[in-house]
Amino acid sequence: MLRFIYFITVILLLTAIISYASTNKEIAIIDKLRNQDQKIWVQAGYDLAIMNDNEAVNILLNALRNQNEYARLHAIAFLDRYNDVRILPALKERFLSDKEIIRYEAGKTIASIDSKYASNLFVSQLQKSGDSIGKNISIQLLSEMGDIRSIPFLVQRLEDPNTRKDSALRLAKFKDKRAVPILTEMILNANGFSQESILEALIQIGDKSCIPSIMNNRETMPIFINVLTRQEHVSPEFGMAVVESLLKLLEEKSRSERWQLQDRILNILRNIKDPSIAPICGKLFLESEEYSPFQNIAYVLADMGDEGVPYLFEGTKLKKTHRIAFGALGSYNSKTVIYEVTQLALNRFYPFRITAIDTLSNFGYIRRKSVMSTLVTLLRDTNPKIKLHVLRIVEQLDLREMAGIIRPLTNDKDQQVKTAAISILDTFGNKPPIKLEIKLNKKSYGYDKPIIMEYRIKNVSD
């Protein structure tokens, strides 16, 4: 009996010690969470990370009920790490009743854990009377989630001077044109909002009615162009309206300024990414000055696929554009394009034949047999320059199957062709192998004495 009592006493004592240690640990963590200094409250996250999830969640849930607002706020920051059913009801409680910043962060964390649960909660909050803070937070969070149910409420907020600017920016995410007049007005009087964020919102909506007022303002135009060139996608109508405005300015600029502006226009065209602009891109490309930024419109045309092909082949006819046109055509994996380039390469009267031949190397990786057949034909050409360019392509594409065709060229009259043919065959391994003879003069297996050897390289055919 005494042993049993002793055993129970030990168990209770150990439980008390563990409970005391756990309580002290929780107190220490919550004390860190209460601190306003970010360096200190972030340390609580490291302490929680090394605990098991259940223990960490219990501490954070207790912190949510703490009287200190910073403890509650910082606890919310760590709760989205855990997938625990107890978290959502506890966060909902904070969302429905607490200080505004805590309610907002609680709602944001709910949305990151379960978007469906969050959207239903926010919509139900909007349907209740009173609690204007809760409604405002719900509208903000719903719009951040991209939920279209927030649109009517955002439109209503456009009438309120205190919320109209924020609501206009949020409506831009839904491409709602009702925000355009307010956003256009905001550009000249940002009042706490960055001009870049306002311009990004207008670009996102894509209503070109705002363009004249932006482009006619010396302060906003350069910012607008910078923002526009950084966008991943611009609607064709909006982008081309800006391009047309910029093209009118080109005539007034010096050459260096003109090329700088061309570079901006080029970046806008790249971001539009729509085949419908192929005609104007083709026109700008074909009329471009040699080495000017507009020459790179060739690659914009290439990104348009089949729509850009006719303008690129027109470019192959002009001295100033033929090189970059072929460079862009080399990116195509199209039988039609490869066939047309091949025909130009075989045409003895085509003035830019060498460039066409060099372009064949781009197709060799995807149409090996077709290109190889063309190269065999080209090697029969009497022009040494043609042969040299073809041999470079053969080596580049590692076309070892053509070794038999190349071998007769090792006796070619042209020394450069002869040397190139020998070099390629050597690379392909058609030259007799080299044998390395090593003769050991003195055997020595001690680590302190070197092994002395002599060697010579000889050709097996010697």
Image (cartoon, rainbow, N blue to C red):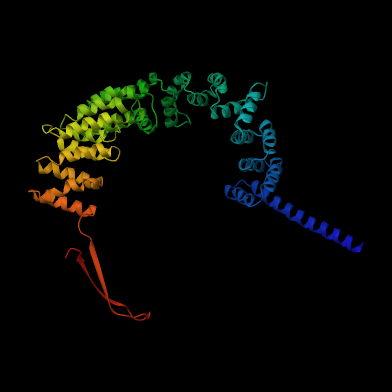
Occupied quadrant, residue 227: top left
Viewer-proximal residue, 105 or 300? 300
Question: In percent of the image, x 63 and y 47: which residue is there?
Answer: 35
Position in image of residue 158 (x %, y %)? 53, 20
Question: In percent of the image, x 13 and y 48: which residue is there?
Answer: 409
In the rendered image of this protein, does residue 235 appear above or below residue 27?
A: above
Residue 350 horizontal side relative to residue 31, left or right: left
Position in image of residue 312 (x %, y %)? 23, 29
Q: Does any portion of residue 398 appear in the rendered image?
A: yes
Viewer-proximal residue, 323 or 346? 346
Question: In percent of the image, x 29 and y 35: which residue is there?
Answer: 331
In the rendered image of this protein, does residue 460 appear above or below residue 346?
A: below
Position in image of residue 171 (x %, y %)? 50, 23
Viewer-proximal residue, 258 or 15? 15
Q: Residue reaching furthest right? A: 1
Occupied quadrant, residue 444: bottom left
In the rendered image of this protein, does residue 359 appear above or below residue 7?
A: above
